[in-house]
Image (cartoon, rainbow, N blue to C red):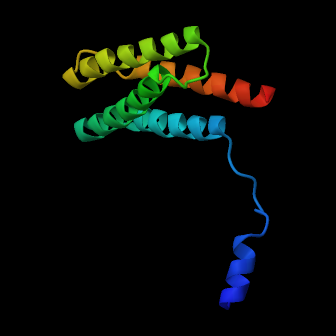
């Protein structure tokens, strides 16, 4: 393929549609939730908790930004869930709780994202 052909294909219409923000968020939750469900050893659990905390920290950061267009009540709920996951994650790492609550929260978020995608 020569440079002319490469340039021509670079600006041609995309064959596959781009993924929506909800689709990307759903996939991120699916990935970390799968990790939480499948973790059996201490290192696997620690990695799954770390990945989940990264996702929730990202969400908490996003909902407090002034330009966030989500309704205030929903932003507050997301921030609260982020705080809860932080506290509960410590308990899981200490061995005094299981990751079940974290899986349940993530699964609920995924169900909401799936429903939102169906409504769009």
Give 97 or 85, whichever is nearer the viewer.
85
For the N terminus, the quadrant is bottom right
Return the residue found at the far left.
94
Q: Position of residue 112 (x, y in %)?
A: 65, 22
**Snapshot quadrant of residue 111:** top right
User: Which residue: 79% across, 30% down?
Assistant: 120
Q: Position of residue 87 (x, y in %)?
A: 30, 15
The answer to whether 32 is drawn above or below residue 91 in the figure is below
Q: Is residue 66 left or right of residue 20?
A: left
**Snapshot quadrant of residue 73:** top right
User: Which residue: 55% across, 24% down?
Assistant: 68
User: Which residue: 78% across, 69% down?
Assistant: 12
Q: Is residue 51 left or right of residue 20?
A: left
Q: Position of residue 78 (x, y in %)?
A: 49, 17
Q: Position of residue 8 (x, y in %)?
A: 75, 78
Instruction: Give the total of numbered labels.
Output: 0
User: Which residue: 45% across, 36% down?
Assistant: 32
The answer to whether 15 is drawn above or below residue 112 in the figure is below
The answer to whether 107 is drawn above or below residue 32 in the figure is above
Return the residue found at the far bottom.
2
Q: Is residue 114 left or right of residue 47?
A: right
The answer to whether 107 is drawn above or below residue 35 in the figure is above
Return the residue found at the far top.
73
């Amino acid at each position: 393929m020569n440079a002319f052909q490469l340039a021509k294909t670079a600006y041609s219409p995309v064959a596959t549609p781009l993924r929506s923000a909800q689709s990307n968020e759903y996939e991120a939750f699916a990935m970390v939730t799968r990790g939480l469900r499948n973790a059996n050893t201490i290192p696997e659990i620690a990695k799954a908790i770390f990945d989940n905390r990264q996702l929730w920290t990202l969400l908490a950061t996003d909902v407090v930004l002034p330009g966030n267009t989500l309704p205030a009540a929903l932003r507050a709920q997301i921030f609260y869930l982020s705080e809860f996951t932080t506290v509960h994650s410590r308990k899981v790492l200490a061995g005094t709780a299981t990751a079940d609550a974290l899986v349940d929260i993530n699964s609920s978020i995924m169900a909401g994202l799936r429903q939102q995608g169906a409504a769009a």
